[in-house]
Image (spheres, rainbow, N blue to C red):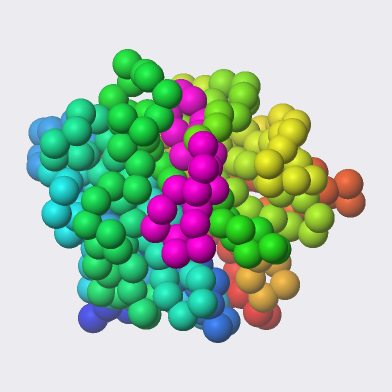
Amino acid sequence: MKHTQGKITGQGNPIIRHKFTADPTVLVHQDTVYLYTGHDAPPDGVEDYVMNNWLCFSSTDLMNWNEHPSPLKAIDFSWAKGNAYASNVIKKNDKYYWYAAVSHASIEGMAIGVAVATQPTGPFRDAKASALISQEMIPPTANPKANLDPSVIIDEDGQAYLIWGNQTCYIAKLKSNMIEIDGPIYTISLPAFSEGAHLHKHGNWYYLAYGYGMPEKIGYAMSRNISGPWKFVGILNEIPYNCETNRPAIIDFKGKSYLFYHNGALKGGGNHRRSVCIDYLHYNQDGTIQPVIMTTKGVDKAGQ
């Protein structure tokens, strides 16, 4: 793999090798895949999460990537004090909405903010100048990291849903403006739910994939309705190499399906220095998903 002047060419996992990348979220728009990642950047000798901004890459074939200037930092939310944790980007009408977990500056615990842009590569700005979800809005909990890892899906009737959580999985409707909660917050009961929820739809099924247990595998549940009931089905992939966390992003692109995740495979990598990977994902005829084999080869050039 080579990296020159914002272009990354090569083959194999991890797909980005000049920076540590984590918690992928992926948007497909006009035959281009936009990959947004966290950015692990702890100083030498520090074993902790140090994440100040998010990164953006794009590709038309999943093998050659363009790196774009960082479109968003944790402190771009004026009410936040830092920690650019897992996020999700979604398009509605002509705008791009970025939901992100950050540390709230004045309310204890993590919070979820939403930023907006008119281009998928940004720049993004805080869409409402306050948190979309804060610790005081959810059922009482002693877990300061309860508000982690947002994921958003827009259902076929246009209704948007936000799902998130750490140890407890929460779901709520979003108003049509995409920056306010619409109605109560509910919980979803899932076995061994840790964090890293990801919602997507394929065919007539909704899928809720998430970090299962600790260290985290990726488990998933299925439903015919976004509001449930959700039936746990099984494990999508095993514990990633040299890394105790896992965060899925699943897309269809140019006729095939893919799972994005992270591991700790780069030199110097580990739990706090992670790297995004891609492997093929295959559905069975009944809608269930075959376990994903994590490879070093990765995927072939998309569209061929």
Where does the image place residue 226, in percent across and percent down from the top left? 69, 46
* In the depicted structure, whether residue 182 falls above or below residue 300: above
- Quarter where residue 116 is shown: bottom left
Magenta segment main secondary structure: loop
Name the image quarter holding the N terminus. Answer: bottom left
- Quarter where residue 219 is shown: top right
Direction top: furthest residue: 142
Direction right: furthest residue: 285
Name the image quarter holding the C terminus. Answer: bottom right
Q: Residue at x 74, y 34 (%)?
A: 229
* In the depicted structure, whether residue 60 falls above or below residue 51: below
Where does the image place residue 288, in percent across and percent down from the top left? 79, 43
Q: Is residue 80 left or right of residue 298?
A: left
Q: Is residue 281 visible?
A: yes
* In the depicted structure, whether residue 88 falls above or below residue 131: below
Q: Residue at x 59, y 49 (%)?
A: 199
Q: Give the residues drawn in magenta, as a range.
A: 162-184
Is 263 in front, or is 32? 32
Where does the image place residue 297, in percent across and percent down from the top left? 55, 57
Is 17 in front, or is 110? 110
Is 245 in front, or is 138? 138
Q: Is residue 17 visible?
A: no
Q: Give yes or no for residue 183 being in the magenta stretch.
A: yes
Where does the image place residue 267, in percent across and percent down from the top left? 28, 46
Q: Residue at x 31, y 37 (%)?
A: 134
